[in-house]
């Protein structure tokens, strides 16, 4: 009778030997964990970008004078609100606004 653990295979005699199948299983498991982690990171980034887009879109309700005080135009806000989701609307709007004010981009 053989018991398989994560790192080693133990034979009935109690001696341990490295199992090829176990090492391959560990590699597959680590790869799956890495892909799952990256998927969760991507979903988190997507959720942040959606919230950022909602905040920027709410700026469209502001008066032009207030937008001017903030340092952006209505066209800038409209542009940022309609960017693809892979971009953060808030970060892009801040970058455009900073460039107009002479600040260094981050």
Image (spheres, rainbow, N blue to C red):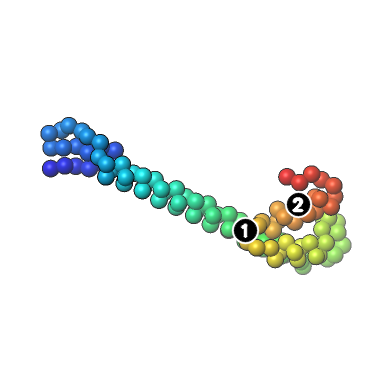
Residue 86: image tag: 1
Determine if residue 76 is in view: yes
Q: Is residue 55 visible?
A: no
In this orientation, which residue lies closer to the viewer: 20 or 72? 20
The outermost residue toward the top is 15
Using the image, tell me which numbered label, if any, was put on residue 37: none
Image point (75%, 64%), residue name? 79
Between 8 and 94, the one lying in front of the other is 8
The residue wearing badge 2 is 95
User: Do the CB atoms of the residues marked 2 and 1 lie less than 8 Å apart?
Assistant: no
Label 2, secondary structure: give it.
Answer: helix
Residue at 15%, 33% in the rendered image = 14
* Residue in view at x 87 percent, y 62 percent: 65
Q: Outermost residue, bottom direction?
A: 61
Closer to us: 26 or 66: 26
Q: Residues within 10 Å of mark 1 (few under 14, many from 20)?
A: few
């Amino acid at each position: 009778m053989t018991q398989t653990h994560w790192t080693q295979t133990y034979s009935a005699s109690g001696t341990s030997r490295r199992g090829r199948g176990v090492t391959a299983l560990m590699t597959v498991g680590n790869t799956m964990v890495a892909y799952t982690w990256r998927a969760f990171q991507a979903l988190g980034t997507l959720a942040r970008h959606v919230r950022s887009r909602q905040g920027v879109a709410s700026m469209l309700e502001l008066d032009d004078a207030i937008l001017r005080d903030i340092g952006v135009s209505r066209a800038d806000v409209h542009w940022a609100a309609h960017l693809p989701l892979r971009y953060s609307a808030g970060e892009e709007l801040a970058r455009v606004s900073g460039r107009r004010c002479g600040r260094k981009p981050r």
